[in-house]
Amino acid sequence: MNSAPSLFRPFRLTNTTGTPYLPKELPWRKILWFVWLVCLVAGSTGVVQRFTQGHLPAGYGSYVPWGLWIGLYFHGVGMAGGAFALGSLGYLLGWPGFQDERNLRQVIVLAVSAMLPAFFAVWLDLGHLDRFQNIFLHPNFTSMMAFNAWMYYAFLIIAGVCWFLSYQPNRQQWLKPLLCLAALFSVLFPSQSGAFFGVVDAKGYWHSALLPMMFLLSALTAGGALLMLARILIDASADQPPGPEEQARSHALIGRLRWVTVVGIVGYFVFEFAEFSVALWNPYLHAPALELVLFGPYWWVFWVVHLLLGGALPLGLLASRWRLGWTISALLVALCFLSARLNVLIPGQAVSEIRGLQEAFQDERLRYIYHATPMEYLVGLFAVALGMTAFVVGRRINVAAHRWLDPRSKD
């Protein structure tokens, strides 16, 4: 066992040696509160702009109607699905560090906390905010958008029931079957998001059978990184340091998620290379959307944010024995894999289906090149603050419910 590569060594339950995941001398709880306050205050200005000025301060228009907020939506629900799928699978299979009901409840809270800001972002993108309920009151299930919305709604209900059953003494009778059903929905989230684009025959860049698999793999990768980051920050900001047994479980969980993140990054870039190579090496195929990704105005999203910060750098850090590097890599993957969604979303809209259409009509809203505005970025910060708030509130509900049901223990 001692000769095993460092990548697999953290799977050992008793392996608690090495450098810490975060510097212990820093007040992490105060740092997290400061980050939350900055995101809340700065993001609130963007939300006020959205409600007072509508869509005018945004960078999207008639030809590119979906921008950063839709990217945040797909990224948020994907991370929620990926985190829940991994957490529930670990519980069902009895992986070290995953088999505790307390960890399962934290996974459920984390998944819901990632979905709420995603729903908030797509809600602000609507032209009529008061019509969001129509997709539930008057659904058309031939629309994949309506199907996805109802699937999210069903998942939230089932996840809530699983959360309640996790407190019951005879929970195994119903908890595991419902958990399997919720895990199925969580896997469908990202794959159906990829199919949402893949079925659009008019967009050659989107019309690909690989997109559902790429969306699923990126969701598992970013969800695993988010789950690992949440576990590290929970331990670092706890009032009291965890005991040896709890610390051993955390190390086992983080080690497993480290491996999942590495495999996910490598697998995603293999799929992405397969997707790009078809267009790049086909002499009879012209792919202007792919050219925008690699060499156009969005080149930095792919080469810097996606390939370097979201791929190469996290892989190098995760392959090392530097545990602080693992934390940095988890943060980078959870944030920068948003670029995986944007590299699909924006270039697919930035190519005209009718030649000469952009030159026929001249207006600021009639352009195929989209750049997110400060207002859109500020709303993104508010979404981060909303997710952090939901997670903290959810954890406190877990603590209160656990103390009420069993005063002798502490969540």
Image (cartoon, rainbow, N blue to C red):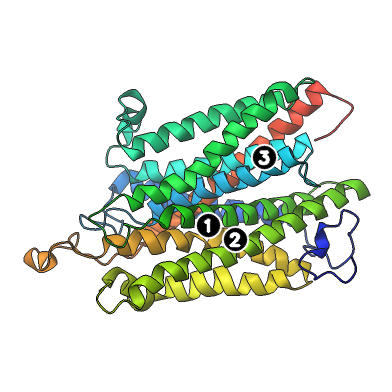
Please give the residue where the numbered disc 1 appears in the rendered image: 218
- In the rendered structure, the answer to whether residue 385 lies left or right of residue 63 reads right
Q: Residues within 10 Å of mark 1 (few under 14, many from 20)?
A: many
Residue 71, image x, y percentages: 41, 54
- Which residue occupies the extreme left position in the image? 360
Q: CA distance from mark 3 to mark 1?
A: 18 Å
Total count of labels: 3
Q: Quadrant of the N terminus?
A: bottom right
Residue 195, image x, y percentages: 38, 48
What numbered label is drawn on residue 88?
3
Q: Secondary structure at mark 1?
A: helix
Q: Can residue 241 be seen by looking at this rendering?
A: no
Q: CA distance from mark 3 to mark 2?
A: 18 Å
What numbered label is drawn on residue 156?
none
Residue 162, image x, y percentages: 65, 28
Q: Residue at x 30, y 25 (%)?
A: 138
Closer-to-camera residue (60/169) = 169
Q: Earlier in the sequence, mark 1 or mark 2?
A: 1
Q: Residues within 10 Å of mark 2 (few under 14, many from 20)?
A: many
Q: Can residue 258 be seen by looking at this rendering?
A: yes
Q: Amino acid at mark 3?
A: Ser
Please give the residue where the numbered disc 2 appears in the rendered image: 264
Q: Amino acid at mark 1?
A: Ser
